[in-house]
Image (cartoon, rainbow, N blue to C red):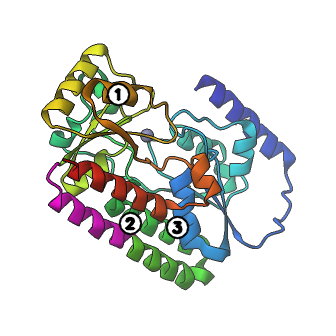
Amino acid sequence: MKKLALIIFALALFIVGCGGEKQSAQDKLQVAASFYPMAEFARNVGGNKVEVFTLVPDGAEAHDWEPSPTDLARLGKAQVFVYNGLVEPWAKQALTALSERKILAVQTGLGLYERSVEAAEDDHHHHTHSCTHGKQDPHVWISPKKAIVQVERIASILCEADEKNAKYYQDNSAKYVEQLKALDIQLTNLAKSAPRKVFVTAHAAFGHLAEDYGLQQLAVNGLSPHAEPTPADLQRLIKVVKEENVRYVFFETLTDPKLAQLLADETGAQIATLDPLEGLNEEGRKKKMDYLQIMQQNIHNLQIALNAK
Ligand SMILES: [Zn+2]
């Protein structure tokens, strides 16, 4: 963090020193998004009136990322900055350093991170990590119910930044929210009808999804993909997988499947993917898949796992 502070300080000097900023060639609203789902939501609301760029590269792990001076300079050119909160501990500092730029920023997950006590149990090594994480779980975009709130907040900030196109943004937002509501209905039905309510994932990215739909997530890693379990944690997890007769263990597209594989080997479960949508993997980029399509895939895979005999 110290290094980041220095970079930001140097950058602030650089920006101040440059003075007379050139008018941007594009007349589209320049929108910076922290990582993939934020960009995706901003593009859907902003349509052809905005130019969205993502700071965390699509194939990168969002939890570990920190901006370089070049990234901060790019952020400095944005009129609007869309971020989730908690995933981007660098955001506030960067915005302070860029305060002269009057960037309109929206922390789309604000007030949505809190998880209930019962569901926090999915973080089975919660005891060792509770001091740092508590019940604040950043992965709100993965639950359609909360994604809707995030999209509506993005719409509000775009309307504020570009009043003359407000109607356009509101219409786009309403259309996109309709599609998110369709996912919401699918998940509600799936969770209601499935005989098994427990699913096992690599990193604990699906807690909000689980909690909002009455499911239970058991995670091998913690809230960050690198919070690795102790051998005792793993033993506990193996026991639960066997007791609950879990047939599939999910791993993610951007993280190492090693532990999920180990768990599967120990319990006879199969491996399947559940995408936390923190970035786009290679397949997603190649096939130009979007949030809605990947969520469909997630729902499909969850359906199989929760119904498997
Ligand atoms: Zn995560």
Side (left or right) of 141 relative to 15: left
Q: Is residue 195 found left or right of 109 in the rendered image?
A: left
Residue drawn 27% across the image and 69% down it: 185
Q: Amino acid at mark 2?
A: Ile
Residue 105 visible in the snapshot: no
Type of residue at label 1? Thr
Q: Earlier in the sequence, mark 1 or mark 2?
A: 1
The residue identified by callout 2 is: 148
Looking at numbered disc 3 in the image, what kind of residue is underneath it? Answer: Ile
| Front tag of 1 and 3 | 1
Quarter of the figure with residue 97? top right
Q: Over which residues does the magenta segment extend?
A: 180-196
Q: Position of residue 77 (x, y in %)?
A: 73, 55
Q: Is residue 269 above or below residue 49?
A: above
Which residue is at the front of the view, 72 or 15? 72
Q: Is residue 53 above or below residue 136?
A: below
Q: Residue at x 23, y 19 (%)?
A: 235
* 114 is within the stretch colored magenta: no
